[in-house]
Amino acid sequence: MSTWSRNNRLPALATLALTLTAAAIALIFFYAPLDEDGLNQKIFYFHVPIAFTAYGCFAWGGWKALRHLWKGEEGADLESYVAIHLGVIFGVLTLVTGSIWARYRWGHWWVWSEDQLVLFLVLFLFYCAYFMLRFSVPPGPQRANLSAVYALFGVVLIPVSVLAIRLSERFIHPVAFDKGGPNMAGSQFFTFCVSCAAMFSLAATLYNLELVGKRLDMRLRELREALQ
Amino acid sequence: MNYLADVGALARKDLLLELRARDTLPAMLLFVVSALVVFHFVLPAGSSDLAATGLLWVALLFTALLGLSRAFAAEREQGVIDGLVLAPSDRSAIWLGKALSILAFLALAELIALPAFALFFRHIDGTLIGGVALADVGIAAVGTLLAAMAAASRARELLLPLLFLPLAIPIVVGGVGASVADDPARYLGLLGLYDALFAIICWASFEYVVTE
Amino acid sequence: MNYLADVGALARKDLLLELRARDTLPAMLLFVVSALVVFHFVLPAGSSDLAATGLLWVALLFTALLGLSRAFAAEREQGVIDGLVLAPSDRSAIWLGKALSILAFLALAELIALPAFALFFRHIDGTLIGGVALADVGIAAVGTLLAAMAAASRARELLLPLLFLPLAIPIVVGGVGASVADDPARYLGLLGLYDALFAIICWASFEYVVTE
Amino acid sequence: MIRARALEKRYGDKRILRGIELDVGADDFLLVTGPNGSGKTTLLRLCAGLAAPTRGDFELGVSRGRIGYVAHEPLVYRELTALENLDLYGRLYRISERRERIGMLLERFGLWDARHERVASYSRGMLQRLALCRAFLHEPDLLLLDEPYSGLDGEGALVLDRELTERAPRTAFVVATHEPERLRRHATDLLALA
Amino acid sequence: MIRARALEKRYGDKRILRGIELDVGADDFLLVTGPNGSGKTTLLRLCAGLAAPTRGDFELGVSRGRIGYVAHEPLVYRELTALENLDLYGRLYRISERRERIGMLLERFGLWDARHERVASYSRGMLQRLALCRAFLHEPDLLLLDEPYSGLDGEGALVLDRELTERAPRTAFVVATHEPERLRRHATDLLALA
Ligand code: HEM
Ligand SMILES: Nc1ncnc2c1ncn2[C@@H]1O[C@H](COP(=O)(O)OP(=O)(O)OP(=O)(O)O)[C@@H](O)[C@H]1O
Ligand SMILES: Nc1ncnc2c1ncn2[C@@H]1O[C@H](COP(=O)(O)OP(=O)(O)OP(=O)(O)O)[C@@H](O)[C@H]1O
Ligand SMILES: [Mg+2]
Ligand SMILES: [Mg+2]
């Protein structure tokens, strides 16, 4: 039942993601005005949405972890894992796009003096450790619990580290949003919003796709066993 | 009341064990002292207070990690953790008792390390001590939970630093900030916030770490 | 020949035990990067090369101590050491096998840590590598014996805390000296002498540590 | 006290228990037998709440603190003395007359003279006796015993016999054993795993 | 093979063994009985050379590598598989046809199917079977068995019976046990500790 309804949702999501992505690309290259940065500023519309999506995935993973611990929701462990897995993938993309941008803008692939970057690296390491933890515990209820607790830690770690970085005030990494709202032109902001939406729907599609695959796997294994 | 009595009994047991077997504290002392000695040798006379303070924090962090890596050794050895988990006390008492005993070990190690630091490097003041104390609380709280996790996993001690270091970054930032910045209050606040937040999560989630 | 085969079998078993968790290497890589990140937060931007070298040594020392503190964990857990002691091979083979596996792990960790260090902090040269290698040998030799003492609870009480510190500090002083002093040769010589002396003592005395 | 329906437990891909049905009342005595590796210990851990079933219904009609569990391992700290171990458990279980009961049990199980020795120096049978003391300390309503006679000498076995006989009418038992004869007279039910 | 005169062993102030006289020939079978804590395990450890006597004469007419010892604990690495453990011991004992013998013993003791599992996941009885495999691996001339039947199910006990019967005529045995009946037919000598 549930698999069927999810299967049904998947094509719709995928279509949405595709259209939004196409729209975003069109907007980025033909509509949004160039900054003083020149052409390489276009990467802004990828880099930032990707970074936001990564955060979103981590948060969703944390939420599912909470559901698992709190309500004992069935399958929440798998969902949390898939979300975090996706988050790590988007995290790598953030690092890559950021590095490319940094190469053009600052002349280095990576700058240690930039706490904002190091902070993201810390989060990334944190979620790598999540994988190490998960794979060194045999599958079963204990693994689900440990992973969920650690995922919850992540959700608290993010704001605390952001706070810590803000305190040290050493960053040159730009801030697109401050107290006065977005500091960019309206057309840029619109493009930015569309590419954000595109990235989010893309992530949602991948998330559901992976879940369906994993569930199918499980179902198959059960069937095989029932036949034995 | 009962809860506190449980915590007390568990922490007391850890101290007793350490008194008997002396497994952990000597290693922690050795490490922290030799780390300071190393720094003493490499830091040229006129180097900045900043560098020295940073190194103190590294030494403290790794010392804590060393202590944590053995935190659940006795429980794991003969599956004693099962015995504790079966007892009617709230499971979080196991965490709290262990965290308190870790805190005691840390405090003892620092009782040696801080004067040694003052001797070798620079004068220590109230804020530094306050920062260290707050950091200890956070380290003990988070570290104990992670040590329990690592003990349950197959990779064990190998895993603990990986799980712990990313989570310790805010502590380091806060601690170093508190010891060197002009307005330490903000950093102490950050440390306090960290302690409170993580202590609550650890307290609430420990039960899930030790049961299936 | 037979002796070497025994040592090989024993060291192989340790590697197998480590690699069982299959993710040892990625774990080490993660650890190194995490540690570097911590260092980044404690060292103010313009810190000296020297301070960085000190950090490197502290990190190495910590890794070694962590490895040693669990060196005989597997043997102690179920009294397996009795099984090894009963085997017809020379008892010193147990020590040598364990020391070699500890050495292998240290070397492996450094194979990752040194390039990363060079990348992030300062250029490393031949003397530094030589110093690290010599220090590794000393740490593995002495550390294994002490870890065995700690595991065979008979000798633990008095020896471990007393011996550990004075034994490790010369290594550290020598190692750091070799990496920063103007005439590293003297320090390297100290390390070499230390290694030779203690390796012989440990080799000859291990038998008494594991039997009554 | 225990009610299980279609209980199943697996570790990874391996199915250890399957289709287990249990009904243990407040004064029942369930004997569990089966060859090595058939899942007796696993079943007892499920009953103790130390492991979670993979599938099936499981109800435990008794609070955690009213269970006594004797495992293959004694579940005591090796570097503490018997007295210190029992004192710790006595505090955790909030036993009234803690010290008196500990003294009584140590004497009954013949450990009084060794009470100040580190458990690490105990002999096999002394460890088993200590494990029994620990399990009986709080007069549990449900006793889960995993090969309780193992390691005991003749006299120790008699002490245990007496304890079981005394408690059988008012305590629920689940006992895993390879020698069911010794316990048959108490048993109200038998579960043979395969 | 073993000759002891006025053997004494103490731990600290506690005298565990006293005035023990032993004569075990190459095909003798010595049963050691006694209550818990009477020193059976200590005696076996003395015979194995794992502990040194405090006083008295003790002669062992067999080299260390020709002894097989089954202790209370299985003396295997928990994180290795059965196969890896036996392989390690096989190498250390320099056994010819190591792999074949290991396969044969695993099969005989019913562990063949579990040979690739980590020992940590073994059940109590499977551990005991593994300990027996380890002790028999190098066809020792002197077998020291400390409660060898503990934890074994009926079938495992039969396998062990068969092994003992086969080896009794050509191997020296010292066996500590709480149920001497099972072994009485082999026994050539009996030592009752008190
Ligand atoms: C390896 C290098 C980089 C990494 C890992 C990185 C990482 C991130 C992350 C995680 C965010 C999410 C939002 C936040 O935390 O505030 C972000 C946002 C952003 N990044 Fe980067 N970045 C990198 C390089 C750059 C470069 C070189 C630029 C341009 C000069 C840049 C421009 C931005 C902008 C404008 C935002 C939006 C900020 C906001 O809304 O607060 N990034 N980056
Ligand atoms: N944590 C675990 N991981 C994987 N397999 C396990 C685990 N615990 C037990 N098993 C397996 O479950 C099976 C049953 O084990 P269990 O200890 O319950 O047997 P048992 O009936 O108590 O046997 P014995 O009579 O030998 O004590 C064994 O095959 C064992 O290998
Ligand atoms: N390392 C030690 N230090 C101090 N006392 C010890 C040590 N080992 C054993 N003992 C003591 O020696 C006595 C005999 O122990 P041993 O294990 O030999 O008994 P056992 O006859 O094997 O008993 P069981 O039938 O219970 O196995 C016990 O009282 C024990 O406490
Ligand atoms: Mg069992
Ligand atoms: Mg014994």
Image (cartoon, coloured by chain):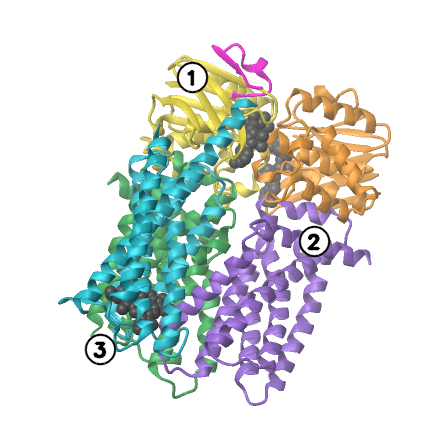
Chain colours: A cyan, B green, C purple, D yellow, E orange
Depth order, front residue of C8/C76: C8
**Label 1 – label 3 distance at C-alpha:** 70 Å
**Label 2 – label 3 distance at C-alpha:** 56 Å
Query: Where D38 falls versus B5 (above or below)?
Result: above
Q: Amino acid at mark 3?
A: Asp
For the record, the magenta segment spans: D176-194
Query: Where E193 falls versus C78 (above or below)?
Result: above
Query: In x, y percent, where is residue B67?
Result: 44, 58
Query: In x, y percent, where is residue A219?
Result: 46, 31
Q: Amino acid at mark 2?
A: Leu
Depth order, front residue of D152/E7: D152
- Do marks 2 and 1 both belong to one polypeptide chain? no
At 50% across and 47% down in the image, what residue appears?
A136
**Left or right: E77 as drawn, with respect to C58:** right
| Residue linked to disc 3 | B182
Depth order, front residue of C144/D108: C144
**Label 2 – label 1 distance at C-alpha:** 51 Å
Q: Check residue D177 for magenta coloring.
A: yes
Under tag 2, what secondary structure?
helix
Q: Amino acid at mark 1?
A: Arg
Answer yes or no: is residue D119 visible.
yes
Q: Chain of mark 3?
A: B
Query: In x, y percent, where is residue A181?
Result: 15, 65
Q: Quadrant of ligand 2?
A: top right
| Residue linked to disc 1 | D167
Answer yes or no: is residue B131 visible.
no
Under tag 3, what secondary structure?
loop
**Left or right: D35 as drawn, with respect to B142:** right
| Residue linked to disc 2 | C10
Depth order, front residue of D117/A17: A17
The answer to which image quadrant residue A210 occupies is top left
Query: In x, y percent, where is residue A137?
Result: 48, 44
